[in-house]
Amino acid sequence: MNRYIRRKLLRDIENTIDYWSPNELATTIGHIAQAKFCNYFQQITQIDENGFDAIVVMDITLTLNGKKITLKKGQKIEIKAKADDFVNSKVLPYDHDKKKNKYDWLLIYMWDGFDNDRAAIIPHDVFENQIINTEGAGKSINITPGIRHNHTNPVYTPLTKLFFEHEIVNLNLLENNGRK
């Protein structure tokens, strides 16, 4: 990007951000999350297509919580971001009718205002079977739910449990690896 345009864009954002609505901030975080995730991996390219946001250009193996997965060249990734600092909703912004069978992997990017971003990458069919096609599963996600009445341990939603099972290990190290 031209450095003058970049400087003006950053200045305009700095001067107007206090006037943005929570939804505008969350939408912006969605774009930032897409760019950040694709920047972490040279094997993944950001592309805005109907039903997915990135494409794998070279096989890549990722370490998840307790397992490794391989994303294959040509596979498509849908990226959904949550920015709970701005929007008081625990529901993942996902429109099943627009996304069904259009991607191979769903990346859920949990943006955090205190530099503790987290992300999980879930196979399309697993998300479909365990969340979309399961009665009562819902699309709520809350990684810090607190303790409900009559429980001594936190009670997690099915999507939150699925997030934990497929969470990318050491995402914060990827962000701090020196890439711009």
Image (cartoon, rainbow, N blue to C red):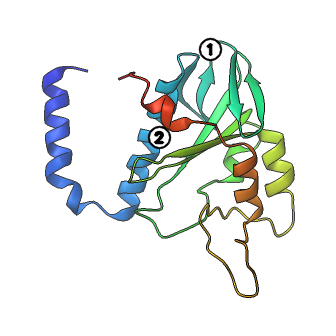
Q: Where residue 141 is drawn, which disc sits there?
A: none
Asked whether 109 or 1 is in front, the reply is 109
Q: Distance between the residues labelled 1 and 2?
A: 19 Å
Q: Residue at x 50, y 29 (%)?
A: 174
- Kind of residue indicated by mark 1: Val
- Say what secondary structure mark 1 lies in: loop
Find residue 107 and report its image quarter: top right
The residue under label 1 is 57
The picture places residue 87, in percent across and down from the top left corner, at: 45, 65
- Kind of residue indicated by mark 2: Ala
Query: Where 105 falls versus 17 (above or below)?
Result: above
Q: Quadrant where the C terminus lies?
A: top left
Query: Where 50 falls versus 153 (above or below)?
Result: above
Q: Where residue 33 is drawn, which disc sits there?
A: 2
The picture places residue 178, in percent across and down from the top left corner, at: 38, 22
Dot 1 alpha-carbon crowd within 10 angstroms: few under 14, some 14 to 19, many 20 or more = some
The picture places residue 82, in percent across and down from the top left corner, at: 52, 54
Q: Which residue lies furthest to the bottom in this view?
A: 150
